[in-house]
Image (cartoon, rainbow, N blue to C red):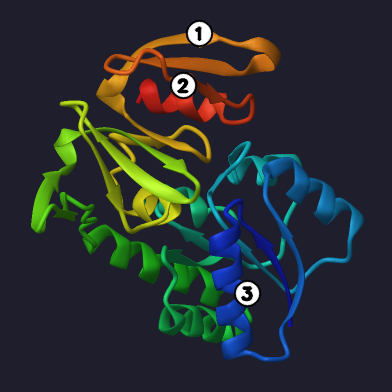
Amino acid sequence: MKVLIVEDEERNANRLIRLLHQIEPNIQIQAVVESVQSCVHWLQTNASPDLILMDIRLEDGLCFEIFEQIQITIPVIFTTSYDEYALKAFKVNSIDYLMKPVQEEDLIQALTKYKGLTTPAELTDSIQHILGSLSKREIVYRSRFLIPYKDGYRTVKVEEIDYLYSELKITHLVLKDKSEMIINQTMEEVEEELNPSSFFRANRQHILEIDSIHNIQNYYNGKLKVTLIRDPQREIIISRDKAPLFKNWLNS
């Protein structure tokens, strides 16, 4: 089986590769691509894989833009943190929709389903079953952090967070009272646990809480510069590729 992985976070891509090789040692990973445009280019210039594992939010937009640019008949398994895109996902040849962090047993079931689906009717039945399961699922996001503090621990509610930043691979929580704490999680792990309606991954170094934003200015080459209410000296740049996602987030 030849597999293409579409994922913009190296950690998540490596996890998928490891799980795939544990489940099917003979699987060939043809490539890992990180963006809408790189995926379109790869599919246009390479032999088709048997299966695509695809994240929904990529570094330059939503993966559905890929399907708007080229015709894809290859089965797709989506791997994402966001249930909100499930219905749209199943309109573009998806056979399953796995929530991050992807668990081995879920991936085994998805691959088994892929091997067993041979007709459009079976694919349609599978989609309806998954949509029914998703509609019953309640998404639970993190509500607090338990953080080592002095000789004990302190509980920090998500509502207290102003923004997060990463420095030297250490994740820092900055609270609305301007205090700062270190947590033992990567930015990718925290991003998956926070409610995306309130928090946005501005770049690799910053996750912003929606009420922390003071001002947004156009920057050169289509980028955006964000100023924070409580930390106006911190300069946060949002890439040209991510700017449309940021605007949609603020406007939703």
Could you tell me the amino acid type at mark 2? Lys
Q: Secondary structure at mark 3?
A: helix
> Residue 200 location, x and y as percent?
39, 35
Q: Secondary structure at mark 2?
A: helix
- Residue drawn at (34%, 43%) of the image: 172
- Residue drawn at (41%, 14%) of the image: 233
Would residue 180 appear left or right of 225 to someone viewing this image?
left
Judging by the rendered image, the residue that carries numbered circle 1 is 217
Q: Residues within 10 Å of mark 1 (few under 14, many from 20)?
A: few
Q: Quadrant of the C terminus?
A: top left
> Residue 60 location, x and y as percent?
63, 36
> Residue 1 location, x and y as percent?
74, 83
Judging by the rendered image, the residue that carries numbered circle 3 is 17
> Residue 13 location, x and y as percent?
60, 64
The answer to whether any part of residue 70 appears in the image is no
- Residue drawn at (91%, 54%) of the image: 45
Could you tell me the amino acid type at mark 3? Ile
The mark lying in front, picked from 1 and 2, is 1
CA separation in Å, label 1 and label 2: 12 Å
- Which is nearer the eye, 198 or 55? 198
Would residue 55 appear left or right of 45 to someone viewing this image?
left
- Which is nearer the eye, 190 or 102? 190
Would residue 18 appear left or right of 176 to someone viewing this image?
right
Could you tell me the amino acid type at mark 1? Gln
Judging by the rendered image, the residue that carries numbered circle 2 is 247
